[in-house]
């Protein structure tokens, strides 16, 4: 008798939970539908502005602090970026705005080939003894250069091939060797 009453009570609680979930879900979907149905009022003062590549593209409308940014209905989706910029026409390429303190360099200021090995060779020259990869990385970070461990290992391999550095046994320490 007690088991039957307990089972019945559990069934009633589960039915109430399902109903409450269905009502909450319906209310949430109604709100989402209302938000997506609204469109941002178009401003007539939108002028084309250069994006830095010499081409002009539409600016996004200025929003008031209390407005929620809305996507425009019936606007074609922009496909994802590919590694090859020639696969898409310039008109459809989205502009990327980076902060003034961006971490990524532009292609014009890219380091030259072999620059990592050269920086690491300078660090090895200044070190009084054999240096671990972590110490090399810390020294580079003090100079403002962030380099991953595989990149450091690759540069050490290049230096080893030129006989500018050598690994001491299996210790993963590297001294400078003037060749």
Image (cartoon, grey):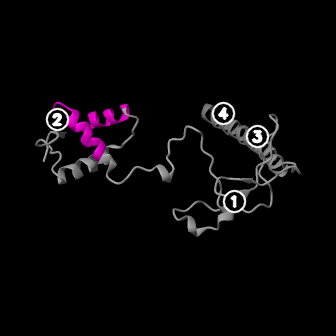
Name the residue carrying label 4.
5
Q: Which of marks 3 and 2 is nearer the N terminus?
A: 3
Distance (Cα) linking label 4 and label 1: 74 Å
Which residue is at 27% across, 42% downward? 120
Q: Is 175 situated left or right of 148 in this image?
A: left
Seen from the viewer's position, the closer of residues 46 and 1 is 46
Q: How crowded is mark 2: few (under 14 residues within 10 Å), some or many (20 or more)?
A: some
- Asked whether the beta carbons under mark 2 and mark 1 sit within 8 Å of each other, the answer is no
Q: How far apart are labels 3 and 2 at the CA level?
A: 65 Å
Number of numbered discs overlaid on the protein picture: 4
Element at label 1: loop
- Compute the Cα span from label 2 to label 1: 53 Å
Residue at image x 80%, y 47%?
A: 61
Helix, strand or loop at label 3? It is helix
In this rendering, would 70 be left or right of 45? left
Report which residue position mark 3 lands on: 24
Residue 36 located within the stretch drawn in magenta: no
Mark 3 neighbour density, 10 Å: few (under 14) some (14–19) many (20 or more): few
Residue 178 quadrant: top left
| Numbered label attached to residue 130 | 2
Of pointers 2 and 1, the one earlier in the residue sequence: 1
Q: Of label 2 and label 4, which has the lower sequence position? A: 4
Q: Does label 3 or label 4 sit earlier along the sequence?
A: 4
User: Where does the magenta region start and end?
Assistant: 118-142
Contact? badges 2 and 4 (CB < 8 Å): no
Q: In which quarter of the image is residue 21?
A: top right
Residue in view at x 77 percent, y 43 percent:
28
Horizontal and vertical percent position of residue 30: 81, 46
Corner quadrant of residue 94 = bottom right
- According to the picture, the residue beneath numbered tag 1 turns out to be 55
């Amino acid at each position: 008798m007690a088991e039957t009453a307990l089972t019945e009570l559990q069934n009633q609680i589960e039915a109430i939970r399902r109903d409450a979930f269905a009502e909450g879900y319906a209310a949430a979907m109604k709100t989402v539908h209302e938000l997506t149905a609204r469109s941002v009022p178009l401003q007539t003062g939108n002028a084309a502005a250069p994006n830095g590549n010499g081409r002009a593209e539409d600016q996004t409308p200025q929003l008031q602090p209390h407005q929620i940014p809305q996507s425009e209905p019936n606007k074609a989706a922009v496909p994802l970026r590919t590694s090859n910029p020639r696969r898409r026409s310039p008109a459809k390429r989205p502009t990327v705005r980076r902060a003034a303190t961006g971490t990524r360099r532009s292609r014009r200021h890219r380091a030259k080939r072999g620059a990592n090995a050269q920086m690491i060779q300078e660090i090895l020259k200044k070190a009084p003894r054999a240096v671990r990869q972590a110490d090399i990385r810390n020294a580079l970070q003090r100079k403002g250069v962030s380099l991953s461990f595989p990149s450091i290992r690759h540069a050490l391999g290049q230096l080893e091939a030129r006989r500018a550095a050598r690994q001491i046994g299996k210790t993963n320490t590297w001294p400078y060797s003037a060749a």
